[in-house]
Image: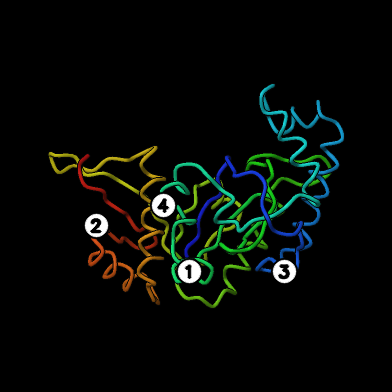
Amino acid sequence: MLILLPPSETKRPGGEGAPWDASRLAFSELTPIRESVIDALVQLSDDPDAAAKVLKLGPKQRGEIETNRSLRTSPTMPAIDRYTGVLFDALDASSLDSSARRWLGDHVVIHSAPFGLVGALDPIPSYRLGAGISLPGLASQRRLWAGPVAAALARDTRGSVLDLRSEAYVALGAAPVGRSAYVRVLTRAPDGQTRALNHFNKAAKGRLTRALAESSADLADTAQFVRWASDAGFETAPDGDVMTLILPPR
């Protein structure tokens, strides 16, 4: 089973890995688009005022422009460690043992704006680019990525896809119809009714991914995932191409 995660706007700086090298990333068929997006980001950074406007940066965020300018020369770290924020803090990949991290590398893919699909352990630099940003000289991200990402996911041989991405990233490449389930998170109120979550939605996805990694789950399809989830203490409600994760009352 393949687990698809969204990226996060917030990222851990620095790293100990060698600078960006497209040959070290999974899904090599996406390399030409990656190169064009990175070129556009680096070039945009030569005009800080234009970069701030395009990237929608406030005065305190202007340091992100230099981060983009250095994309090709700055150090890298595994993608799963690069991202911070609610989902990735709940996942806390750096605290997992080597076996669980290998599971992440084998089963987890993160969908980023400049790199498209990357493996959890693929080395990436820090950057600033959101899913809804169109870069000068390039088509919209949806036009750039949607077809190639969807095709790459359709060719992937890891079985069913559990899609934990946000809708913004689903729009940049749909998971294969017929063997994927989009995960939504609800909470069950004391009266038994369910309702949507905001902040805890991301945390629940992080905890779910961590539990999968810690168990080294070997799941071929969503039916096996439902059985695993029940044994692991997660309540799920599959319904066609949607998998609802229901959290207990808080």
Name the residue that disc number 1 marks.
98
Q: Position of residue 129 (x, y in %)?
A: 67, 42
Q: Alpha carbon of mark 1 to alpha carbon of mark 3: how far?
A: 29 Å
Name the residue that disc number 4 marks.
206
Q: Alpha carbon of mark 3 to alpha carbon of mark 4: how far?
A: 28 Å
| Residue at the outermost left position | 191
Q: Earlier in the sequence, mark 2 or mark 4?
A: 4
Q: Amino acid at mark 4?
A: Gly
Mark whose residue sits in front, 3 or 4? 4
Mark whose residue sits in front, 4 or 1? 1
Is residue 191 toward the left or the right of residue 122 in the image? left
Q: Amino acid at mark 2?
A: Glu
Name the residue that disc number 2 marks.
235
Determine whether the residue tagged by mark 4 lies in a helix, strand or loop: helix
Q: Position of residue 230 (x, y in %)?
A: 23, 64
Is residue 208 toward the left or the right of residue 16 in the image? left
For label 3, the crowd category at 10 Å Cα-Cα, with few meaning under 14, some 14 to 19 and many 20 or more, is: few
For label 1, the crowd category at 10 Å Cα-Cα, with few meaning under 14, some 14 to 19 and many 20 or more, is: few
Q: Is residue 100 above or below residue 194?
A: below
Q: Position of residue 248 (x, y in %)?
A: 21, 47
Q: Amino acid at mark 1?
A: Ser
Residue closer to the observer: 111 or 203: 203
Q: Earlier in the sequence, mark 1 or mark 2?
A: 1
Q: How is the protein colored in the picture?
A: rainbow
Determine whether the residue tagged by mark 1 lies in a helix, strand or loop: helix
Q: Alpha carbon of mark 2 to alpha carbon of mark 4: how far?
A: 15 Å
Q: Earlier in the sequence, mark 3 or mark 4?
A: 3
Name the residue that disc number 3 marks.
29
Q: In which quadrant is the C terminus drawn?
A: top left
Mark whose residue sits in front, 1 or 2? 1
Residue under the image location 54 percent in, 53 percent down: 170
Q: Alpha carbon of mark 1 to alpha carbon of mark 2: how far?
A: 28 Å
